[in-house]
Image: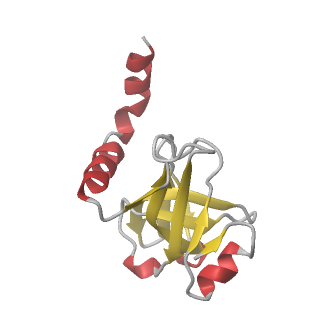
């Protein structure tokens, strides 16, 4: 597995290799906290992605983004960060570069197939419509 920064991420994934990256920003909080967590990304088949998968894609401007797939429609794919309420899309399947296979927290690797991760991801995704209200309540 290649570490981020040693080679072009998209190129490595197109060659069938897995990469480990350190996500920046807080759009995927609480799943990823910058400086603490890393993402293990593997090549993706856009046709096999399901809502809930965390996907690495390239925006029209060239920026790589790691967000959760919210829904698939005939016109494209729709994504949102775990810490966001706005959905981005439609994006073309060709913009998909990879998919999250695991994350590393405090040196421990956790697979996205882990039942606890799957349950928490599902619940968090379903709470998207009320996240703003939940955050407001938690701040009080």
Q: Is residue 101 above or below residue 52?
A: below
Q: Residue furthest bottom?
A: 15
Residue in view at x 29 percent, y 56 percent: 118
Q: Is residue 35 above or below residue 59?
A: above
Say which quadrant the N terminus sits in: bottom right
Q: How is the image coloured?
A: secondary structure
Q: Quadrant of residue 22?
A: bottom right
Residue in view at x 36 percent, y 62 percent: 112
**Picture coordinates of residue 46 (x, y %)?**
46, 78
Left or right: where 123 falls relative to 73: left
* Closer-to-camera residue (109/66): 109
Q: How many marks?
A: 0
Left or right: where 71 falls relative to 17: left
* Closer-to-camera residue (105/64): 105
Q: Residue furthest top?
A: 140
Residue in view at x 43 percent, y 64 percent: 102
Left or right: where 74 falls relative to 36: left
Residue in view at x 31 percent, y 53 percent: 117
* Closer-to-camera residue (31/5): 5
Q: Is residue 135 above or below residue 79?
A: above
**Picture coordinates of residue 11 (x, y %)?**
69, 82
**Picture coordinates of residue 76 (x, y %)?**
49, 70
Say which quadrant the C terminus sits in: top left
Q: Is residue 121 above or below residue 69?
A: above
Q: Residue furthest front?
A: 107
* Closer-to-camera residue (17/126): 17
């Amino acid at each position: 597995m290649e570490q981020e920064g040693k080679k072009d991420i998209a190129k490595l994934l197109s060659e069938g290799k897995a990469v480990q990256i350190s996500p920046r920003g807080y759009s995927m909080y609480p799943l990823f906290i910058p400086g603490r967590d890393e993402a293990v990304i593997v090549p993706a088949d856009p046709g096999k992605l399901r809502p809930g998968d965390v996907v690495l894609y390239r925006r029209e401007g060239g920026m790589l983004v790691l967000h959760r797939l919210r829904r698939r429609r005939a016109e494209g794919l729709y994504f949102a960060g775990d810490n966001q309420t706005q959905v981005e899309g439609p994006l073309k399947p060709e913009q998909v570069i990879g998919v999250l296979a695991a994350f590393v927290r405090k040196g421990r690797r956790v697979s996205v197939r882990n039942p606890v991760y799957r349950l928490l991801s599902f619940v968090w995704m379903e709470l998207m419509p009320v996240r703003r209200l939940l955050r407001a309540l938690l701040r009080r």
